Image (spheres, rainbow, N blue to C red):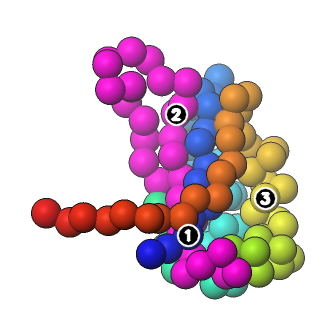
Amino acid sequence: MTVKVVGLYGQPADPAGWERRYAEDHLPLAAAIPGLRAQRAAKVHGTADGSESPFYLVGELVFDDVDAVQAGMSSPEGQAAATNFAELAPPGSLLLVVEETFDRTF
């Protein structure tokens, strides 16, 4: 199983401008993190009950294990991506480290 750094991005005031900065600035910085195995993003359309979500986008950085996350995020490239996250993230955003514990593919 893998370990991920998951960014939950709050609702931006200017979605088009935010998406441009995310794509042009943040994604390349994150892609340079040593040990990164995959980079994913998913736009949030709402909650399961149909109400508006406090989150706009979920970003994932996938690593082999916790040691790889720690090494990657403590590198100069990881620090640059983390700094950019702090600058880019709208209010209400969160940055989590999660470990997959179950994966069933159908």
Local secondary structure at mark 1: strand
Q: Quadrant of the N terminus?
A: bottom left
| Mark 3 → mark 2, Cα distance in angstroms | 18 Å
| Mark 2 → mark 1, Cα distance in angstroms | 22 Å
| Closer mark to the observer between disc 2 and disc 1 | 1
Q: Residue at x 37, y 30 (%)?
A: 45
The range drawn in magenta is 41-68
Residue, disc 2: 56
Q: Residue at x 59, y 78 (%)?
A: 65
- The residue closer to the viewer here, 5 or 28, is 5
Residue, disc 3: 82
Q: Residue at x 67, y 81 (%)?
A: 68
Residue 44 lies left or right of residue 82; in this view the side is: left
The residue most toward the front is 101
Do labels 3 and 2 touch, CB within 8 Å? no
Which amino acid is tagged 2? Tyr
Q: Whole-percent x and y of residue 74?
A: 83, 74
Q: Is residue 29 magenta?
A: no
Asked which quadrant contains residue 69, the reply is bottom right
Residue, disc 1: 3
Q: Whole-percent x and y of residue 22?
A: 62, 50
Q: Earlier in the sequence, mark 3 or mark 2?
A: 2
Question: Counting other residues with Cα less than 10 Å from the Cα at mark 3, is it few (<14), some (14-19), or many (20 or more)?
Answer: some
The residue most toward the left is 106
Residue 65 lies left or right of residue 95; in this view the side is: left
Which amino acid is tagged 3? Ala
Local secondary structure at mark 2: strand
